[in-house]
Image (tube, helix red, strand yellow):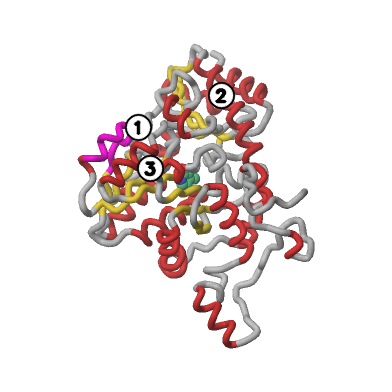
């Protein structure tokens, strides 16, 4: 491959494989080395001082070359000034909020959120004197009444977990900025291959690397990307002493490997999910389907503007409701009953069943607003789409 000149911009799929790594600087190793070390030394006292002055180049909680390569590559793909990779997606949510919010501050969130982010917002942050204000951001105008001079952050997912509802990033960002708040988008359901919120006005983007970006269901990770001044706080304060939620270099190396096939995988996830969504919409046992790239979906127009295609995530409900969902789940043969998403395996969950079971150990467990008893969340994997459809059809047969 001829290396591009400084003004040549390579395409997304190419940058996901090559950006920020030159084998000739690493003894010709085509796969990046994994640096297993907890600490660093320098040849002289002066160079140690210089490393200390740059922040974090002394100790592996804050600095690791393998993780740094992953950060450089993810920042480039997302179109972000800066990036910090952490141990899990929840570590990203926790490190971000604890770094940027103080007692008395307010955060506005969309009312439907990933279950553990919802727990953070409803039970976690209020314990520290941070006010969390849930709003239905499906109508961005609802934001205006929720913003106060203490609102620091407007936070939402799109597509939303678990509904696959679409929120309008540009419209929400415009109103949030007018009110003096920054905008944080959790883009886990789309990945940067399909959606880049910073181009649409978001200040920070967050992903669970555990999902599409790694894509193989064998590692946990999280990332926050965006404005350099904010990332500096999340890294320099958040990771250093608020959470210490550093990713292991082995996990970072696995995510770098998964990332190489991200665009290829997203094409297949999206094409198969659209075929499954079309089958479900036409099925007599199915009451409703949400998939943003179905022309009949309420999110279709906005999805066309802010996403390159649909991902593998869809939600649906059966005419048989809660019991019908459980009956269908028990009949599936190929599709795996498991939480998580974005893996090579197709995965399905029934949030109402999980909440019912969890209430035994956590009485406060409840479904997020907007999530019904009948909702099934389906993450379409990379199996042959015909086999996925056959499995759903046999499980839905009367
Ligand atoms: C899974 C998920 C998270 C949390 O990520 P972990 O890596 O599991 O900690 C956060 N947001 C969304 C939308 C998710 O799907």
Q: Which residue is mark 2?
A: 274
The reply to whether the C-beta atoms of the residues labelled 3 and 1 are less than 8 Å apart is: no
Q: Which residue is mark 3?
A: 156
* Label 2 beta carbon within 8 A of ligand 1: no
Cα distance in 3D space between marks 2 and 1: 23 Å
Check disc 3 and report its element: helix, strand or loop: strand
Q: Residue at x 63, y 62 (%)?
A: 66
Check disc 2 and report its element: helix, strand or loop: helix
Q: Which residue is mark 1?
A: 370
Mark 2 vs mark 1: give the one in front: 2
Position above or below: 197 against 348: below
The quarter holding residue 299 reads top left
Q: Return the x and y of residue 91 as percentages of the image width and height.
A: 46, 56
Crowding at dot 3, Cα within 10 Å, few <14 / some 14-19 / many 20+, comes out as many
Cα distance in 3D space between marks 3 and 1: 14 Å
Cα distance in 3D space between marks 2 and 3: 24 Å
Q: Residue at x 53, y 69 (%)?
A: 61
283 on left or right of 28: left
Q: Which segment did they paint magenta?
A: 134-144
Q: Considering only order in the chain, which callout, 3 or 2, is on the residue closer to the N terminus?
A: 3
Q: Return the x and y of residue 46 as percentages of the image width and height.
A: 57, 86
The reply to whether the C-beta atoms of the residues labelled 2 and 1 are less than 8 Å apart is: no
Position above or below: 246 against 219: below
Whether residue 353 can be seen here: no
Q: Residue at x 67, y 50 (%)?
A: 257
């Amino acid at each position: 491959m001829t290396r591009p000149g400084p003004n040549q911009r390579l395409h997304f799929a190419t940058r996901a494989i090559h950006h920020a790594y030159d084998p000739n600087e690493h003894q010709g190793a085509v796969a990046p080395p994994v640096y297993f070390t907890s600490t660093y030394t320098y040849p002289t006292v002066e160079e140690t001082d210089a490393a200390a002055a740059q922040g974090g180049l002394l100790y592996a909680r804050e600095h690791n070359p393998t993780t740094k390569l992953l950060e450089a590559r993810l920042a480039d793909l997302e179109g972000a000034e800066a990036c910090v990779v952490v141990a899990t997606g929840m570590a990203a949510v926790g490190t971000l909020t604890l770094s940027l919010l103080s007692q008395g501050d307010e955060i506005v969130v969309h009312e439907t959120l990933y279950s553990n982010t919802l727990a953070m917002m409803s039970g976690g942050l209020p314990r520290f004197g941070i006010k969390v204000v849930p709003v239905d951001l499906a109508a961005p105008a609802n934001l205006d009444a929720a913003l106060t001079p203490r609102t620091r952050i407007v936070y939402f997912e799109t597509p939303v977990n678990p509904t696959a509802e679409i929120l309008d990033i540009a419209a929400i960002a415009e109103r949030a900025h007018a009110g003096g708040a920054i905008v944080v988008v959790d883009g886990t359901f789309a990945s940067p291959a399909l959606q880049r919120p910073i181009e649409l006005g978001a200040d920070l983007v967050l992903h669970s690397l555990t999902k599409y970006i790694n894509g193989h269901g064998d590692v946990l990770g999280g990332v926050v990307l965006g404005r350099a001044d904010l990332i500096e706080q999340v890294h320099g304060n958040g990771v250093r002493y608020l959470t210490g939620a550093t990713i292991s270099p082995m996990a970072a190396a696995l995510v770098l490997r998964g990332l190489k096939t991200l665009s290829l995988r997203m094409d297949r996830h999206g094409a198969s999910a659209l075929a499954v969504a079309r089958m479900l919409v036409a099925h007599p046992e199915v009451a409703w389907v949400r998939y943003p790239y179905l022309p009949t979906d309420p999110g279709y127009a906005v999805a066309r503007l802010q996403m390159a295609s649909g991902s593998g995530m869809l939600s649906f409900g059966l005419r048989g409701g809660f019991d019908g969902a459980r009956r269908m789940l028990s009949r599936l043969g190929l599709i795996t009953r498991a939480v998580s998403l974005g893996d090579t395996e197709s995965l399905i969950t029934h949030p109402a069943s999980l909440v019912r079971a969890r209430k035994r150990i956590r009485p406060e467990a409840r479904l997020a607003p907007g999530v019904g008893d009948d909702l099934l969340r389906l993450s379409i994997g990379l199996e042959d789409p015909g086999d996925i459809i056959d499995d759903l059809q046999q499980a839905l047969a009367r």
